[in-house]
Each structure stands twice: as C-alpha cells, then as structure tokens.
Amino acid sequence: MNPQADRLRQLLAGPDFLLMPCCFDGLSARLIEQAGFALTFMSGFAVAAARLARPDTGLISYGEMLDQGRAILEAVSIPVIADGDTGYGNALNVRRTLEGYARAGFAGIMIEDQVAPKRCGHTQGKAVVGRAEACARIRAAVEAREAGADILVMARTDARASHGLEEALWRLQAFADLGADILFLEAPQDEAEMRTFCQALPGPKMANMLEEGVTPLLPPAVLAAMGYKIAAYPLTLLNSAVFAMREALADLKAGRVPARRVDFATMRAIVGFEDYHRLLEHYEGESLA
C-alpha cells in the first residue's frame, strides 16, 4: 500500500477545501509543506521551465519527469500528485507511466486527452485525441491501479477549447464511469461553465487557477461553493521565483546587494543543515564510544 495515496483519499473524503500550490523541485515542494499546505502537484509546465528552460510542449520526457519527481518526493512528507501528461504514448505507455509513478511514491497521477506532443492547456494550438483513445488511456490507468499500483487517477480533458463544453463534459462523465478518482476540466472560459461542470459530474473536481489564464481566477470560497474540491495554482511559485530572481539580478547589475531575500540562517534551516549536523554528531559520538 502507498501511504501517500491513502492520505490523499482521506483529504478528498474530508470536509476541507484543498488549496494546492504546484511545485517544480525539492525546494519548492518543501516550502509548500513548511507553509502548511496539505498536498502539492508536480507541474509539468513548471518542471519543463525550471529543469530545461523549455516550453511545456511535450519536450520533457517521462524519465526526466520521474527523476524530478523522486527528488520532490524525498524532500516532503505530504502527498504529491504527478503530471502524467498524455501517458507518453499508447495505453500500454500509460500503464507503465502510472506504475512507475506509483512505485516512486506519488499519491496521484494526472492523465489527459491531448494529442502528443501535448502543450500547456492555456495556450493556442491544442488538439485532443478521439473519444476511444481518450477513454483507453483512462481505462489503462484505472486497470493498472486496480492491478496493484496504489495511486489515484486524475482524468483531464482539454476538449473544451476545440470541441466545446458539451463534448468535454461527455468525456469527463466517461472517465468517471471508468473509475477515475478526480476530474479536471481544463480551461473553462467563465463561471457559468465552471458551475455547470461541478453540477453535472460526480466526485472530487479540480480547478486550475492560472494567473492570466483562460479560466476566471476565483477565490477559494467561491470555488468551494461551486462544488470544487481542489484549487491548483500551477505557476504561482515559479512566476514569483522568476520575478524575485530578475529583481535580484537587476540589483546586482546595478552594484547593490538585493534587500529582498531570506537570510543565510533561514536558508540553512530550510535545507536542513541543523538536522544534518545533529545526525552527524550522533554517529560520530557512537564511533568514539
């Protein structure tokens, strides 16, 4: 059994609306946990940007995402949901992706219905596969879960952009019927569409709160009242970090030491120097005894 998957199930069954800042490396994930959030999501956009400085257009591979995910999982104790993109191939690739993420310790995995190579859900040029292939991906993920890969399945559709809301809702209902644990309608265009999604479909649902994206950026209380269970903030940390780094670089270029920064003692504490030295003293003391 996967304790993180169990913890995610408990959170979904509990009364709280879940705020989920998204991470891209071990440090961002640890900051999310230290800030008191109950879970996080490894954003494919953010990982591609932070690790490769490349766009979220299918350029980053399954192996690179899994490697980044292992570093994130080692840094935190809260549940982490993984971005599984399109599953990196056909239905058998989806199964392998899900099984690999489950072995690594992810609590959940998101699988979407875009054509590969996929792209960010709030950019132009998206396309989705046909209904049969979309359903085959989710069926493969659910069957892998039922065969012993203990991980929750988040099913996503991007069909709203190209096929309209009715088709997107049809797909999400099909994904729910296949056994998906969480449903995700990407890029609804207004509050009415968001409300229709929540009212029309069963189970936990996630809202994607991307600043300057297609979907209205709504307060958590409004999202909860609509019927959402999770609000994801996919790029808030990355965007804020880039802003701060650019500001610091401008200060350095002007000959100034940046004033807006954490101090050295705080950084040492965040990455665990005190714990390291405490454990080192424990073993060095034993060797001298």
Image (cartoon, rainbow, N blue to C red):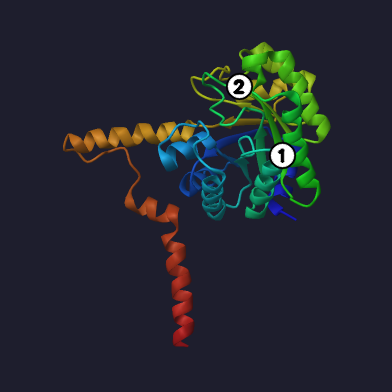
**Residue 257, picture quadrant:** top left
Front residue (pair 266, 62): 62
Label 2 sits on what residue type?
A: Ala
x, y (%) of residue 43? 54, 37
Of marks 1 and 2, which one's residue comes earlier in the chain? Answer: 1
Q: Residue furthest left?
A: 255
Front residue (pair 100, 198): 100
Q: Please, what secondary structure does the residue beneath circle 1 have?
A: helix
Query: In 3D space, how far apart are the residues under numbered discs 1 and 2 (Cα atoms)?
Result: 18 Å
Q: Residue furthest bottom?
A: 289
According to the picture, the residue beneath numbered tag 2 turns out to be 127
x, y (%) of residue 142? 77, 41
**What residue do we see at 54% from left, 45% from top?**
65
Front residue (pair 168, 35): 168
Whether residue 254 is situated above or below residue 68 in the rendered picture = above
**What residue do we see at 19% from left, 38% from top?**
256
**Label 1 crowding class (10 Å Cα cut-off): few <14, some 14-19, many 20+?**
many
The label on residue 285 is none
Asked whether, in this view, residue 259 is left or right of residue 54, the answer is left
According to the picture, the residue beneath numbered tag 1 turns out to be 91
Whether residue 242 is situated above or below residue 2 in the rendered picture = above
x, y (%) of residue 154? 70, 35
**Label 2 crowding class (10 Å Cα cut-off): few <14, some 14-19, many 20+?**
some
x, y (%) of residue 61? 53, 42
Whether residue 64 is situated above or below residue 121 in the rendered picture = below
Label 1 sits on what residue type?
A: Ala
User: Which quadrant does the N terminus fall into?
Assistant: bottom right
**What residue do we see at 68% from left, 11% from top?**
192
